[in-house]
Amino acid sequence: MSEALVLATTTGPVRTLTLNRPAALNSFTAAMHVQLRGALDEAADDAAVRCLVITGAGRGFCAGQDLNDPEMSGDVEDVVERLYKPLALRIRSYPVPVIAMVNGVAAGAGANLALGCDLVIAARSASFIQAFSKIGLVPDCGGTWLLPRLVGRARAIGLAMTGDKLGAEEAERIGMIWRCVDDASLQDSTLALANKLAAMPVKALAQTRQIIDAAMPMDYAAALSQEAQVQGGMSRAGDFAEGVAAFLQKRAPVFKDR
Ligand code: T3D
């Protein structure tokens, strides 16, 4: 049997995927990419999963590409195109909300994997490093798109050029991540957030992500038109009827769409 490089656990409606190469700070090999892709597909196909959490085993979240992996000496453009790009796109179009639970250092593609998730919750001891510049590369796994949108051009350029470590507290302060919490409460805080999202109309949450991203290059009128069109679709789905009925009947809603 092949080594479990990605562990999947389920707690109610929440599926947690744990990158599992702790001795190398969960850095990516081609094999780990394949297992992560399989685990993402499996969770997406499981109607009982209503929120996904991605985290790392041991003291790190993910140190990006494994610099010892034989893929490194191959065609790097092909590796990025074939492995990192589909991963980044998959998370950005996932059918349910995706939370990065950053338990430790997130470097290179590992940092941008986290930043591409819908919500990033990090332990106070965790950190983010755009490590690419230190080894003569440029940010990938979505970093060039994500960073300026999250923190503005000045900070994006500063972080990407210096490759300096940014602590979780500062990452929260500058709006790069959703929350920084005490290490001891990371798991509980994440599960509470994941359960909260899982109980919401997750189809509408996934659509919210889609249209916020799509609106980035649009003018105001185009964004308003997009909202009208997608709102029309959402209003015909079951969750809308349930949400309104629950409100009028003064009861808790039970959302099912995905
Ligand atoms: O195909 C392509 O390459 C294109 C794709 C590129 C995407 C990228 O992600 S490029 C960026 C790759 N990542 C890095 O450059 C980060 C390298 N790692 C570090 O700079 C440091 O490890 C950290 C700052 C992340 C953490 O430092 P520290 O002092 O807490 O830990 P450490 O001692 O450096 O690492 C612990 C172990 O993990 C160590 O192994 P050892 O000596 O105990 O056997 C170290 O070699 C290993 N490790 C950490 N990062 C990687 C790694 N092994 C392989 N690849 C890594 N990226």
Image (cartoon, rainbow, N blue to C red):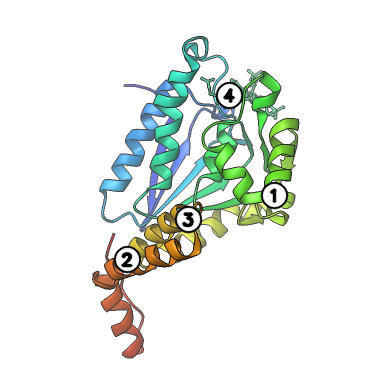
Q: Is residue 140 above or below residue 45?
A: above
Towards the viewer: 121 or 156: 156
How many residues crowd around disc 1 within 10 Å: few (fewer than 14), some, or many (20 or more)?
A: many
Does the rendering let one see residue 136? yes
Disc 3 C-beta below 8 A from ligand 1:
no
Question: Which amino acid lies under the numbered mark 3 shown in the image of this protein?
Answer: Met
Residue of label 3: 218
Residue on which disc 2 sits: 229
Rendering quarter of residue 230: bottom left
Residue 124 percent location from the top left of the image: 70, 50
Identify which residue is drawn at 63% across, 45% down.
148
> Mark 4 is on which residue type?
Ala
In screen coordinates, is 56 left or right of 131?
A: left
Q: Earlier in the sequence, mark 3 or mark 4?
A: 4
Extreme-bottom residue of the structure: 249
Q: Which residue type carries mark 1?
A: Ala
Q: Look at the image and tell me whether residue 199 can be seen.
A: no
Residue pointed to by mark 1? 171
Question: Residue at 56% across / 34% down in the picture?
Answer: 110
Query: Looking at the image, is mark 3 or mark 2 nearer the viewer?
Result: 3
Mark 4 residue CB less than 8 A from any atom of ligand 1? yes
Mark 2 surroundings: few (<14), some (14-19) or many (≥20) residues within 10 A: few
Q: Is residue 195 above or below residue 115?
A: below
Instruction: Classify 10 Å Cα crowding around label 4: few (below 14), some (14-19), many (20 and above).
Output: some
Q: Nearer the viewer, mark 1 or mark 3?
A: 3
Return the residue at label 4: 24
